[in-house]
Image (spheres, grey):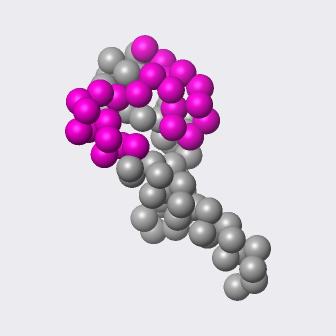
Amino acid sequence: MNECHIEAAEAAVQRECDSLANRSRAVVEGTGSVECIDCGEEISAARRAAAPFATRCLACQNHAEQSARRYGR
């Protein structure tokens, strides 16, 4: 594995840690998020109504789930 792959893996781990911290904070506070924690765009009202604790927009959530499956997380 070269240095580029290691840096990419470290960045992915950091993003996931940040995401987990933000999700935990939302659960403790009893709120979801209006802005996606990944892209910063607004989470649609329909998504917030369907998943009140959502912290990602639908596109970023799908991407996160695909990445998790791909990397076994």
- Main SS, magenta region, reads loop
Q: Using residue 61 as the reference point, say whether residue 40 is left or right of it.
A: right
Q: Is residue 69 visible?
A: yes
Say which of 27 and 49 sits in front.
27
Foreground of the two, 57 or 34: 34
User: Quick one: 54 or 10, which is closer to the camera?
Assistant: 10
Give the image location of residue 21, x and y in percent.
Answer: 38, 50
| Position of 16 relative to 46 (above/below) | below
Q: Is residue 46 above or below residue 72?
A: above
Residue 58 x/y as whole percent: 50, 32
Question: Is residue 43 found inside the magenta-colored segment of the image?
Answer: yes
In magenta, the rendered stretch is 22-45
Residue 16 magenta-highlighted: no
Q: Quadrant of residue 48?
A: top left
In the rendered image of this protein, does residue 47 appear above or below residue 29? above
Q: Give the total of numbered labels.
A: 0
Seen in the image, is 52 located left or right of residue 47?
A: left
Q: In terms of image quadrants, where is residue 7?
A: bottom right
On screen, residue 20 versus residue 10, left or right, reads left
Q: Position of residue 2 (x, y in %)?
A: 75, 83
* Residue drawn at 32 percent across, 41 percent down: 25
Task: Identify the residue at horizontal 42%, vertical 64% (top origin).
Answer: 73
Locate the N terminus and report the quarter of the image it occupies.
Answer: bottom right
Q: Position of residue 44 (x, y in %)?
A: 48, 18
The relative height of residue 5 versus residue 29 in the rendered view (above or below) is below
Which residue ends up furthest to the top in the rendered image?
Answer: 45
Residue 65 visible, this orientation: no
